[in-house]
Amino acid sequence: MNDEETLALAQQLVRIDSVNPSLVPGAAGEKEIAGFVAEFLKGHGVEADVEEVAPGRPNVVSTLPGTGGGPSLLLCCHLDTVSVEGMVEPFSGRIEDGRLIGRGAQDVKGGLTAMLSAAVVLSKRPHRSDVIITGVADEEAYSAGTKALLEKGVRADMAIVFEPSDLEVVVAHKGFGWLRVTTTGVAAHGSRPKEGVDAIAHMGRFLVALESLADELAARDPHALLGTASVHASLIQGGRELSSYPDRCVLDLERRTLPGETEADIVGEIEWLVEALGSDARFKAAVDVELFRPAFEIDEAEPLPTGLRAAVEAKRGESRFAGMTGWTDSALLAEAGIPAVVFGPGGAGLHGIDEWGDTAQICQCRDILVDFAEKL
């Protein structure tokens, strides 16, 4: 595919509403875009299967068979986007001054375009390695698509996960844990303080301790690519009405992790804060894990990152390995024993109201993928 054909595909993809219904109830989801992707591949002679992972939430899976002898390569790109609230023309797909405009143009339909365009090129050329093309559902929420791929038994010797990286090879990113802390008090009439125990005030004590933990994390030695770990209070609710002592307060917090930190590590930290406040017999709190996603890191010396970086440098000149603060599905692939990196064309306006993708990088990404796959 030439640049004109590639960018026309990019415009078509942006014009398809694929907002994740896990984020926006009733949103379109991935059904239409999955169907489009499958028909696009079939139209270029590439077989593709649409596999539902939840009602109305499909993946697309296709394999380009190699001639043999090379390591298998999994290309994984999500189909969903975040909300379009506040955007004037979220699905315009127009191109202005080298910018593809609309929701998903950067995250990550530019990468999806590059992957599909590369697949078409590779389908017409001999290459040793099997290349598995996947468009997955639900990455912006709970990663149901990638989890379904792994549960189905899809495996490869290496994987590229598409996210906007400005064509830098990302070899590490942070993980996260969502934890819930609930303080329990005693409900009573506001005029009877001896009968009531204020759960909100007790949560205040915990928040002071949480702030101290945040300061301690910020003071630790930083990771070379990711900086320091962090924790913050995200959501809080409590109380019944003005004239009553609140018997319950709930805090949802987020702990961003570095490679090597486990779920047990971060739960232990929060439980220690709670236990330290337990010298007051009236203080009662519970800690629950809502979701945990591990951090990700791959050795820069492994064949995948070094080979992909070489392909980038052949196309663009000097390159570097990079880190990413956000979480991606590469961590799930790594957990399953599949070496992975994060890679893709960039832009600006990530999850914002003015999102755009870099059209030159989309076409360069296509060529880099072809070059890398052909040399495996």
Image (cartoon, rainbow, N blue to C red):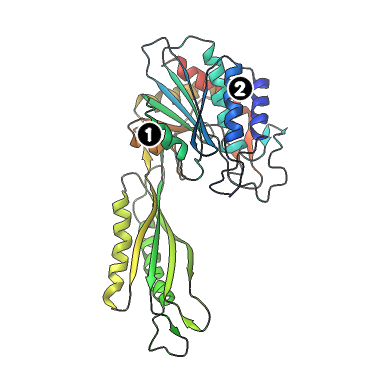
Left of 186 or right of it: where is 346?
right
Tell me the mark number nearer the camera, choosing from 1 and 2. 1
Q: Quadrant of the N terminus?
A: top right
Mark 2 neighbour density, 10 Å: few (under 14) some (14–19) many (20 or more)? some
Residue 186, horizontal then vertical, whole percent: 39, 79
Residue 284, horizontal then vertical, whole percent: 33, 73
Query: Can the viewer see residue 365 in this picture?
Result: no
> Where 48 sits versus 140, above or below?
above
Query: Which residue is nearer to you in this view: 126 or 231?
Result: 126
Left of 354 or right of it: where is 52?
left
Residue designated by label 2: 40
- Closer to the N terminus: mark 1 or mark 2? 2
Left of 98 or right of it: where is 30?
left
Q: Residue at x 65, y 35 (%)?
A: 16
The mark found on residue 7 in the picture is: none
Residue designated by label 1: 151
> Where 354 sits versus 9, above or below?
below
Amino acid on which the number 2 mark rests in the picture: Phe
Circle 1 sits in a helix, a strand or a loop, which is it? helix
Q: Quadrant of the C terminus?
A: top left
Left of 207 or right of it: where is 49?
right
Question: Spatial distance from mark 1 to mark 2, Cα to Cα?
Answer: 26 Å
> Where 303 sits versus 347, above or below?
above
Residue 4, horizontal then vertical, whole percent: 68, 21
Q: Which residue is drawn at 68% across and 31% down?
A: 98
Amino acid on which the number 1 mark rests in the picture: Glu
Query: Which residue is nearer to you in this view: 58 or 108?
Result: 58
Which residue is most to the front? 55
Q: Residue at x 41, y 12 (%)?
A: 128
